Amino acid sequence: MSRISLSLPLIASLIASCLAAPLQQRNDTQECISTKLPTQHLAKSIDFTSCDASLGLPEALECGTYTVPVDWDHPEGEQFDLGLVRLPAPANSTSYIGPLFINPGGPGGEATGLVAALAGGALGDVEALFNAFDIIGLDPRGVGSSNQIKCDMSIYAENVSLFPTTQDEYDALFDKNKRLGESCRNLTGPLLEHVDTISAAKDHEAIRIALGDQPINFQGESYGSQLGAQYAALFPCNIRTLGLDGILQHSQGEAANLFIESSGYELSFTHFFSWASTNESSPLQGTDVEGLWIELLANASTSPIPAASCNDTTCRSTVSAEDFLFNAQGNLITPSPDASAPGTWGYLAYALQNASLGDASALSTTFGASNVPGLAISCLDWTHESSLTLEGVLAKKYLLEQHYPFTRGASQSWTIQHACLGWPALVQNPPKKLDIDTGDATILMVVSDADPSTALPWGVGMLEEIRNKSFIMRKGEGHTSLVLGGETTQVIGSYLITGEAPESGLITTS
Ligand SMILES: *[C@@H]1O[C@H](CO)[C@@H](O)[C@H](O)[C@H]1NC(C)=O
Ligand SMILES: *[C@@H]1O[C@H](CO)[C@@H](O)[C@H](O)[C@H]1NC(C)=O
Ligand SMILES: *[C@@H]1O[C@H](CO)[C@@H](O)[C@H](O)[C@H]1NC(C)=O
Ligand SMILES: *[C@@H]1O[C@H](CO)[C@@H](O)[C@H](O)[C@H]1NC(C)=O
Ligand SMILES: *[C@@H]1O[C@H](CO)[C@@H](O)[C@H](O)[C@H]1NC(C)=O
Ligand SMILES: *[C@@H]1O[C@H](CO)[C@@H](O)[C@H](O)[C@H]1NC(C)=O
Ligand SMILES: *[C@@H]1O[C@H](CO)[C@@H](O)[C@H](O)[C@H]1NC(C)=O
Ligand SMILES: *[C@@H]1O[C@H](CO)[C@@H](O)[C@H](O)[C@H]1NC(C)=O
Ligand SMILES: *[C@@H]1O[C@H](CO)[C@@H](O)[C@H](O)[C@H]1NC(C)=O
């Protein structure tokens, strides 16, 4: 290791140049200022009762609702109910702190479901966390129990390419998106125009106040980090702890978003190839998995591979190269050999083996109603100016194929930029840089260096937008760290409980 030594004249000239061109300084006399939410018409508290048995939630959970305006700019206008669950700390806890919000991301992920999973042991032994907090799962507006966005799923299921290469294909995509969005507006109402992340952050503030008006504790996974950062930008003085895990940077430009997300997807895929080719728990051990993938894509381009378990009602009956490219990504999330459920490397290895034997069911495109809330949120949060012409789409496709031969541009960012073309609800929260100044509260930023979804450049990029932070990097596979149950989970848990962040720059390996 070498140290950079500075000579005295060099230091003097550095100081002189700083004096000549002063950096923008933090104004320390400025009080931290939170947006004031119009809460005068809202209930002062939330009643929690046992959850309806039909929801199938763990018995330890309690359920509640809270009525908020559809449009926070018109607090006396139309109202709707947010749904939330609480996993209460034990009554005899001696380390009780208060509520802790936890959000799984998506967008479109159900926080109620995540809390149910935690209550069911998804984090392993986290007794200290359960003793310290009432764990709150608030489904974001338009998601799950919070007035879920409804759409005509037969339009959603229409087989139209997200990679149009001709004007006719482009027009077909635009038309499908427009009709789908209109059906969502018809079936959901004006909430479709107000499911942006700023509105969702304001809902969290309303619930924080109704739960006793203590400074917030918030843990955001993946897109939940965008929600958390947005909360912090609006309400910087109302924070005790705010953890961001698997960080999304909302302010990037459109081409950059594609390039960044693809960089993570491609990197993770190459790591998967070597794992699946060599690991004893992979069904493809001893085969050239990279070659298999390329051959599958080529075969499916000529003629889509049948999906024996699908009949075009809940999933598509054939799997095209495009379907393979989009649907593999979600299976890189968890680097585990367990193949019993989607989302793992083990599952992907079996899915590829089955596809090569003629059944690609596990990688077929699904038509579940829970797919649309995330789309509706995304269409209000991200622009797609570069997709407004076919040339723009083709240029982006070319760019990504050049750099990312295994993933070829397919990613969630690509879906957002092309499934929102023609969407009838206008963008409410266009990308822009945040300047998050929480004063004394330190934000914990956690990234992993081979994340297949929230790729490392987003997390590093957010260093510009958050002033007081501690930045932790996990060296390892998979998307987000909290649920892995390793050293990083311990670091996050200890931060949430003590309020003390570890020294910035910590590197973890599990
Ligand atoms: C700092 O902020 C305070 C309060 O907003 C303001 O009065 C003061 O002028 C600011 N100082 C500078 C140097 O900008
Ligand atoms: C709280 O009560 C439970 C169940 O009665 C018991 O297992 C636990 O040890 C108690 N915890 C404390 C901190 O007293
Ligand atoms: C939405 O509702 C309008 C007015 O009732 C109707 O004309 C239109 O066909 C509907 N569109 C879709 C896609 O459901
Ligand atoms: C096989 O993969 C599993 C899961 O990633 C890992 O725990 C194990 O160490 C790997 N085996 C070898 C020999 O690398
Ligand atoms: C298609 O599959 C679904 C789900 O497996 C099943 O409920 C439905 O009956 C099937 N429809 C037809 C026409 O086979
Ligand atoms: C979907 O469209 C692709 C491209 O036109 C085609 O190859 C495939 O057969 C279609 N799938 C179904 C189930 O119609
Ligand atoms: C692969 O095929 C086998 C045999 O049909 C099936 O049991 C298994 O669930 C499939 N797994 C995946 C991930 O497709
Ligand atoms: C691709 O198609 C060829 C010709 O049908 C077949 O021999 C080969 O096994 C297929 N490859 C994969 C990976 O499915
Ligand atoms: C960050 O917060 C700590 C307390 O947690 C405080 O001492 C420090 O001044 C803050 N730093 C900045 C840059 O605001």
Image: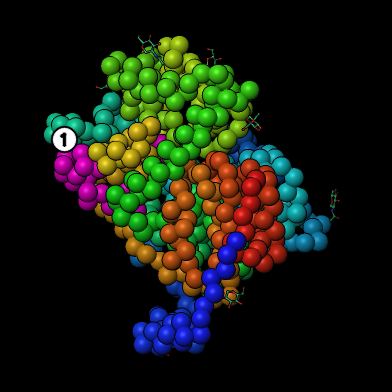
In which quadrant of the rendered image does the C terminus lie?
top right
- 213 relative position to 490: left or right: left
Q: Residues within 10 Å of mark 1 (few under 14, many from 20)?
A: some
Residue at figure coordinates x 26%, y 30% from the top left = 161
- 93 relative position to 52: left or right: right
Q: Is residue 261 magenta?
A: no
Q: Quadrant of residue 164?
A: top left
- Evaluate whether residue 347 shows in this view: no
Q: Quadrant of residue 76?
A: bottom left
In which quadrant of the rendered image does the N terminus lie?
bottom right
> The magenta stretch spans which residues?
371-396
The residue lying furthest to the left in this view is 167
Looking at the picture, how far across and down is residue 221, in whole percent?
A: 53, 50
Q: Which residue is mark 1?
A: 171
Residue at figure coordinates x 38%, y 26% from the top left = 324
Residue at figure coordinates x 22%, y 45% from the top left = 387
Dividing the image into four quarters, tell me where ligand 4 lies.
top right
- Say what amino acid the circle numbered 1 marks: Asp
Q: Is residue 391 magenta?
A: yes
